[in-house]
Image (cartoon, rainbow, N blue to C red):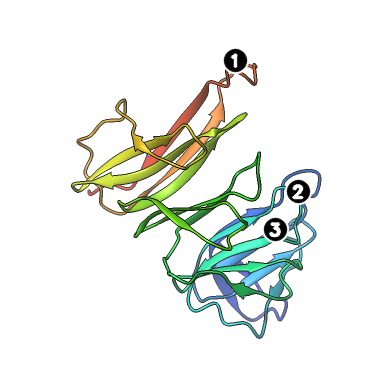
Amino acid sequence: FFFQAEDGIRDYKVTGVQTCALPISSILFAGTETGFVNKTTNKGLNWTQSGRDYYFGGGITAVAIHPTNPSIVYVSGGKQIHKSTDGGNTWKAMLTERFGADRVKIDPSNPNVLIAAAPEGVFRSENEGSTWVKVWNAPAYDIEFMPGNAKNVYVLSKENGNFRIVQSTDGGKTFSIHSAFPSDIIESSGGLLAMTRSEEHTSELQSPCNLVCRLLLEK
């Protein structure tokens, strides 16, 4: 979608939006394909450009806000992870070995842990983005933590030209192919994952969930 800048002149195509978790969900950050990061503190009514003098290196492809501290924000742009610890006023590049993340997710049970899905694979950090380890070698498009049990992580990936879902049961340290997902769906333009808690279960220990996968297929 598009939003209009404060000067009322420029329209920007938004490539990623992230809101902080409750009770401070009025704060959102939006990245644009032209390489800008914008912030609102009133649920989108007004926006200001974040890091005006900082070069993000290219279009913003992912945004992640700390679940309880909106001063900590991560964005992906120009094959780099950029981090702010002051609500987007200043930014710092975090990667020494660069990759272009299309999705960055923060572990809701341990915000020190981040997982990134990228064309180069899946990457994981245990120290708030300071260092990263590749944990899956195939291209990846999206990530979902299981609600109520962040040890279970799902990633939409591909293998031999076909979509695959890979699963971790140790918080993203290791992944294996999820055998229940069909292995003959041809990948064309990536896809998205979404996960919600099943209405039939309410136990935090059980935590069965519905996993939804939207695939962009060849016509």
**Are the residues at dot 1 and dot 2 in contact (C-beta closer than 8 Å)?**
no
Q: In this view, does 219 lie to the left or right of 29?
A: left
Front residue of 175/60: it is 175
Q: Is residue 161 left or right of residue 137?
A: left
Mark 2 sits on what residue? 68
Front residue of 148/61: it is 148
In the image, residue 210 sits, relative to residue 150, either above or below, namely above
Label 1, label 2: how far apart the Cα atoms are: 26 Å
Say whether disc 1 or disc 2 marks the residue closer to the N-terminus.
2
Label 1 SS:
loop
Residue found 64% across the figure and 17% down from its top: 202
Front residue of 86/169: it is 169
Residue found 23% across the figure and 49% down from its top: 218
| Disc 1 residue type (three-letter) | His
Label tally: 3
Q: Is residue 90 left or right of residue 75?
A: right
| Disc 3 residue type (three-letter) | Leu
Q: Is residue 199 left or right of residue 168?
A: right
Say whether disc 3 or disc 1 marks the residue closer to the N-terminus.
3
Residue found 72% across the figure and 69% down from its top: 47
Kindly report which numbered mark, 2 or 3, lies closer to the viewer in this rendering: 2
Task: Tell me the number on the disc at residue 28.
Answer: 3
Residue found 62% across the figure and 71% down from its top: 37
